[in-house]
Image (cartoon, rainbow, N blue to C red):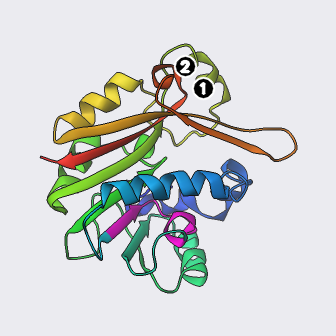
Amino acid sequence: MAAGLSAPAEGRFGPSYFETSYADYDRQNPPRKLAFYRTLAEQALVGIARPRVLDLGCAFGKFLSVLDPAWQLHGIDVSEHAVRRARVALPRARLAVGSAAAIPFGSTFDLITAFDVLEHVPALDAVRDGLRARLGPEGRLLFVVPVYSGITGPLVRLLDRDATHVHRRGHRFWMEWAGAAFDIVGWWGIYRYLLPGGHYWHRPTLRLRRASPAIAVWARRR
């Protein structure tokens, strides 16, 4: 969830963090949502037979678990608690405690993903440049962030109770941030909310993306 943070931040992302901020973690990551993320990853990796993938802020390994088992899967999270759980659930992946500023794996990757992670990261420009350096030629970056602009912006701010979100930015900020080091291939809006009764509403859109409370961005290393 917060792989861009430094190791001392582990105390903020232990069991109590997930129990309070993400008590409905499984419901917030239903099959439909994970299938959308997988589709984006597959589109980004067309033509690569056995890609190397790194998931930043892998948490309990939900996203990695739905990817092709033939892929070379890696995940990091600043939370030791999360990594321990992920290792039990996903023994076939290489998982480690680490941050985007200190990725513990030595090789480059074809795809780096960061789902609801970058809003936690203080030194965004340094992390962006570091991620670019860890991608191979034409490597891909795929990230999802909440956004606080457009007609849904005030509502997103009102509902956001996560004190570890250090960036409450709009669509334009994230496009410019990524565009400084990557070529933007595509981006989608995402409408999402955990409804009463435990149903998680997750609907990607192109048409209404500028008014969405979250965005998914696919970029290629320049």
Q: CA distance from mark 2 to mark 1?
A: 5 Å
Which residue is at 48% across, 59% downward?
Answer: 38
Magenta stretch holds residue 195:
no
| 8 relative position to 176: left or right | right
Name the residue tied to disc 2: 153
Residue at 57 percent across and 66 percent down: it is 62
Where are the magenta residues, as a range? 53-65
Looking at the image, the residue that sits furthest to the front is 47
At which x and y percent is residue 145? 46, 39
On screen, 114 above or below 165?
A: below
Q: Residue at x 62, y 32 (%)?
A: 160
Label 1 element class: helix
Q: Write down the residue under mark 1.
A: 156
Residue 5 position in % (x across, y down):
39, 54
Q: Which mark is residue 79?
A: none
Instruction: Give the quarter of the image for residue 200.
Output: top right
